[in-house]
């Protein structure tokens, strides 16, 4: 799909249909089972991360949602590493090695940051974030920490200037080089669902982002735009 229509509004939709209906190809030297399973598993894990959020007060993991979130974030790293390794390509393998060093460094910072938030609200439940921000949003207490968390999330999402995982100018698209068709689409669904999730976390921690509030969605769109703007 390369035709501009209505200022390109339907371009992403056309690209999605094009990717999902393309033919898959088999790699002779890849670890086929891991190669095919990892994109599906990555989307499943990022969907599980959404279970930690208190959607309309229906939190399935009410008491330990922060702990569940930390576990899912740890698994995410291994999924991307396995995607790069299972392709048995020197380019994807190099991308995975570069990613390990970055992810370990910034995930330690992220975990320490979230532990500080847990100690501040004296709870492991994300729902308690709202109860502690009834009178004062955390952004007024921790503005510089919000900037720090935004930088950490940029590294987690592999956005510029932390795109060592892809580094398209030198690594030929990075870990997803050997993926095509619907598997390639699943990799990008995983990436953009992660962007939406990280934006939700930013709004909840600093702006009392309760879903019943109408202005919550404007704050969410603002952070999504910031993450997309860095590309």
Image (cartoon, rainbow, N blue to C red):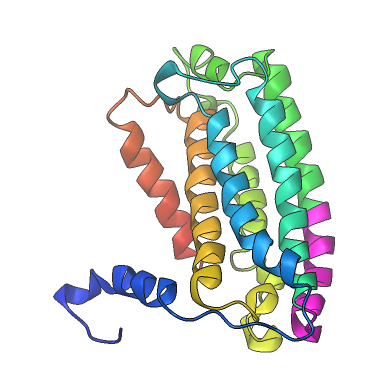
Does residue 121 appear to the left or right of 223 in the view shown?
right
Can residue 139 be seen in this snapshot? Answer: no
Q: Residue at x 50, y 30 (%)?
A: 204
Q: Is residue 178 visible?
A: yes
Q: In which quadrant is the N terminus drawn?
A: bottom left
Q: Position of residue 23 (x, y in %)?
A: 49, 81
Specify whether residue 91 is painted magenta.
yes
Residue 161: x, y in percent?
A: 63, 68
- Using the rendered view, name the quadrant where residue 25 is placed: bottom right
Residue at screen point 76% across, 37% down: 111
Per the picture, the main secondary structure of the magenta-coloured stretch is: helix
Residue 108 inside the magenta-drawn segment: no
From the viewer's perspective, is 26 left or right of 105? left
Q: Is residue 209 left or right of residue 4?
A: right
Q: Residue furthest left?
A: 6
Range shown magenta: 88-104
Q: Nearer the viewer, residue 143 or 106?
A: 106
How far from the left and from the top, in percent, is residue 17? 35, 71
On the picture, is 30 further left or further right than 168? Answer: right
Say if 17 sits above or below 70 in the image. below
Residue at position x 66%, y 34% from top? Answer: 69
Q: Position of residue 134 (x, y in %)?
A: 44, 13
Would you place residue 212 above or below residue 34 in this image?
Answer: above
Is 52 rendered above or below residue 171? above
């Amino acid at each position: 799909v390369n035709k501009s229509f209505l200022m390109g509004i339907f371009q992403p939709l056309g690209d999605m249909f094009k990717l999902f209906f393309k033919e898959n190809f088999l790699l002779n030297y890849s670890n086929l089972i891991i190669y095919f399973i990892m994109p599906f598993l990555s989307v499943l894990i990022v969907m599980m991360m959404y279970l930690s959020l208190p959607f309309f007060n229906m939190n399935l993991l009410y008491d330990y949602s922060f702990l569940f979130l930390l576990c899912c974030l740890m698994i995410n790293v291994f999924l991307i590493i396995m995607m790069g390794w299972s392709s048995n390509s020197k380019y994807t393998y190099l991308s995975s090695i570069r990613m390990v060093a970055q992810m370990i460094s910034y995930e330690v910072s992220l975990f320490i940051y979230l532990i500080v938030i847990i100690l501040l609200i004296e709870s492991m439940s994300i729902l308690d974030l709202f109860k502690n921000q009834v009178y004062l949003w955390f952004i007024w207490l921790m503005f510089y920490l919000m900037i720090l968390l935004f930088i950490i999330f940029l590294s987690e999402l592999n956005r510029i200037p932390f795109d060592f995982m892809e580094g398209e100018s030198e690594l030929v698209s990075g870990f997803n080089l050997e993926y095509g068709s619907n598997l390639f689409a699943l990799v990008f669904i995983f990436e953009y669902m992660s962007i939406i999730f990280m934006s939700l976390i930013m709004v909840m921690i600093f702006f009392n982002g309760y879903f019943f509030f109408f202005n919550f969605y404007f704050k969410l769109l603002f952070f999504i735009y910031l993450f997309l703007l860095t590309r």
